[in-house]
């Protein structure tokens, strides 16, 4: 989203409005931008070892630039998407250079899409993990999503979010998001089947 030119404060506010403990840029800072870069580099190496091409997303390239060009590796390094003042009691604040570096005045966005992109992307990945047996129950998917990735607790967890909306409505909105924002929102037949297969019966 930041790479598309959407203002950083809007992205963070969307996360907070969803019920996340902190905004997504703050999460990336906490887990370290340098770690995200390392994961990307390892993934590229794994793809190369299998003879496949790895194409980094715009977001991954932005994180790489933050670390390599702007020397902002995350909170532990003292600088990331946020500034971390050393004065006692001083609060972190978004790095002012995000605006001139990334924000585009004509970038189209609305708060509903931002919130849905955050919620649906994580829910889709959780459902994919279920379909691939990385997760083996809706219960662990829900608990893990809340305590592991900060998915909003009010939803009951990422899978419960899907079931609360309704499978048909979730698939329809995911298709809309995929058409507008890319393949990360596309639901494979296997993932759709897993969502149906694991649906709780009350």
Image (tube, rainbow, N blue to C red):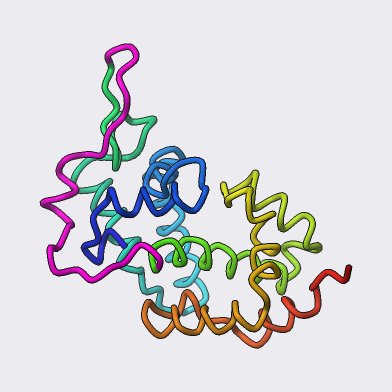
Residue farthest toward the right in the current orientation of the protein: 202
Q: Position of residue 151 (x, y in %)?
A: 58, 52
3 lies above or below 174: above
* Viewer-closest of 79 and 137: 137
Q: Is residue 24 magenta?
A: no
Q: Quadrant of residue 57?
A: bottom left
**Identity of the residue drawn at 68% across and 67% down:** 164
Q: Quadrant of residue 84?
A: top left
- The mark total stands at 0
152 lies above or below 122: above
- Asked whether, in this view, residue 16 is left or right of residue 78, the answer is right
Q: Which residues are magenta?
A: 87-112
Q: Position of residue 28 (x, y in %)?
A: 41, 46
* Viewer-closest of 153 and 196: 153
Q: Is residue 96 magenta?
A: yes
The main secondary structure of the magenta stretch is loop
**Identity of the residue drawn at 49% across and 76% down:** 185
**Identity of the residue drawn at 36% across and 74% down:** 55
Quadrant assignment for the N terminus:
bottom left
Q: Position of residue 114 (x, y in %)?
A: 38, 63
168 lies above or below 202: below
* Viewer-closest of 128 and 24: 24
**Identity of the residue drawn at 60% across and 80% down:** 169
Residue farthest toward the top in the current orientation of the protein: 88
Quadrant assignment for the C terminus:
bottom right
- Asked whether, in this view, residue 113 is left or right of residue 3, the answer is right
């Amino acid at each position: 989203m930041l790479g598309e030119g959407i203002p950083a404060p809007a992205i963070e506010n969307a996360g907070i409005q969803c019920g996340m403990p902190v905004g997504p840029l703050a999460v990336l800072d906490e887990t370290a931008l340098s770690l995200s870069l390392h994961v990307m580099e390892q993934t590229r190496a794994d793809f190369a070892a299998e003879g496949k091409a790895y194409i980094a997303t715009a977001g991954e390239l932005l994180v790489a630039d933050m670390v390599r060009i702007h020397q902002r590796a995350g909170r532990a390094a003292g600088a990331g998407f946020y500034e971390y003042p050393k004065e006692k009691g001083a609060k972190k604040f978004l790095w002012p250079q995000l605006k001139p570096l990334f924000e585009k005045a004509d970038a189209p966005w609305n708060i509903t899409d931002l919130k849905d992109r955050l919620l649906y992307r994580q829910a889709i990945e959780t459902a994919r993990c279920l379909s691939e047996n990385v997760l083996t129950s809706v219960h662990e998917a829900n608990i893990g999503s809340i305590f592991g990735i900060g998915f909003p607790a009010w939803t009951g967890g990422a899978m419960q979010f899907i079931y609360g909306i309704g499978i048909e409505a979730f698939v329809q909105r995911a298709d809309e998001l995929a058409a507008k924002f890319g393949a990360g929102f596309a639901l494979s037949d296997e993932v759709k089947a897993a969502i149906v297969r694991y649906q709780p019966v009350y």
